[in-house]
Image (cartoon, rainbow, N blue to C red):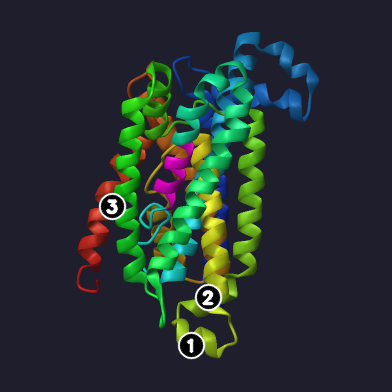
Amino acid sequence: MTASRLLSAKSLCIIAAISLYFATVASISVGPMNIGFFDSIKSLLPNLFFSSTKADLPPHITMVVQQVRLPRTLLAIAVGGILAISGAVMQGLFRNPLADPGIIGVSSGAALGAAIAIVLFGELATHYPTLLLFGTVPVFACLGGTVITFVVYRLGTGANGTSVTMMLLAGVAIAALAGAALGLLNYFADDQALRDLSLWTMGSLAGANPRGLWLAFITLAILFIVYYRDADKLNAMLLGEAEARHMGINVQSLKRRLIILAAAGVGVTVALAGMIGFIGLIVPHLARMLIGPNFRSLLPVTLLMGGLLLLVADMLARTVVAPLDMPVGIVTALLGAPFFIWLLIKQKGRL
């Protein structure tokens, strides 16, 4: 990679980080109750710098910012980052710009696992709500995503290695099967579980809380560290599996490890925020158009852009039909579906 491209990547990281900062403050400011830009900053200062600034603000503003909007904003950044870098890795691993965790069935498997937990353990969660968030739902979501990933991986792997086309086709079939199972669960669910499932399948960040944030950011950190460590191997995979093997890379081991990590990451996002699509498809493609395919620069840019895009989408979800709170998954679908159609048209000669 040339020095100018490296400078461009660093510049884009700085621009994305600054944009993410201002979007964070804007996200804290906007909503059914408008809070001034500087009041939003001051409400954060007591925890960071000066305890005296808290007295300058009404208690209800401090409470809304620190207990409602700030956790939701941080969750949007973490979930967007996880989905974006996982999408970038999947696209590089399969050398296909249309590949993302949702398209190969990972999201569907995680969704089915979490839905099973909601329906089966919903009554128990009425008395122990923390158990639903940190016990059954994340575990079942990760298990569902991992099991579906292994099924798709096995269906797509033959004597000649892993076929991207077979994995994508298997993912479509598995997603349809998981959708049918979700419909069956909706049919048998009671009223409370049905409401939870309906809101959750459309994607929402409204349930953000400090413990969920710890889980999200720890997952994001682990994924980024492992993905970045394998950046050179992913760059070699862009040349083809045969070339990567000649360079001494264990291709099957690399695929297995990264696919499992992507499944676990998507399982965590599904457990915390429900079904949020297209982030893992749009962001890596846009970042690649701006700075090229080198994963050492692509991953940090993708992480920042993923958090930024989901944060902006969540602000739209909170303001378009205020005071109602639209599920953020609807907004990302409205933004992502036209982009996916454009990408299909652009790629149809090569598919």
Quarter-of-image position of residue 138: top right
Q: CA distance from mark 2 to mark 3?
A: 31 Å
Secondary structure of the residue carrying numbered label 2: helix
Secondary structure of the residue carrying numbered label 3: helix
For the C terminus, which image quadrant? bottom left
Which range is magenta? Answer: 106-114
- Up-down relation of residue 121 to residue 235 (above or below): above
- Give residue 253's mark: none
Where is residue 304 drawn, in percent x and y?
54, 50
| Residue type, label 2 | Gln
- Give residue 252's mark: 2
Asked whether 112 falls inside the magenta stretch, the response is: yes
Q: Is residue 159 left or right of residue 176?
A: right
Q: Which residue is mark 1?
A: 243
Where is residue 190 drawn, in percent x and y?
39, 19
Residue 325 in view here: no
- Up-down relation of residue 156 to residue 47 (above or below): below
Residue at image x 44%, y 35%? 115
Q: CA distance from mark 1 to mark 2?
A: 13 Å
| Residue type, label 3 | Phe
How many residues crowd around disc 1 within 10 Å: few (fewer than 14), some, or many (20 or more)?
few
Where is residue 246 drawn, in percent x and y?
54, 90
- Give residue 339's mark: 3
Q: Is residue 344 left or right of residue 221?
A: left
Residue at image x 72%, y 26%? 45
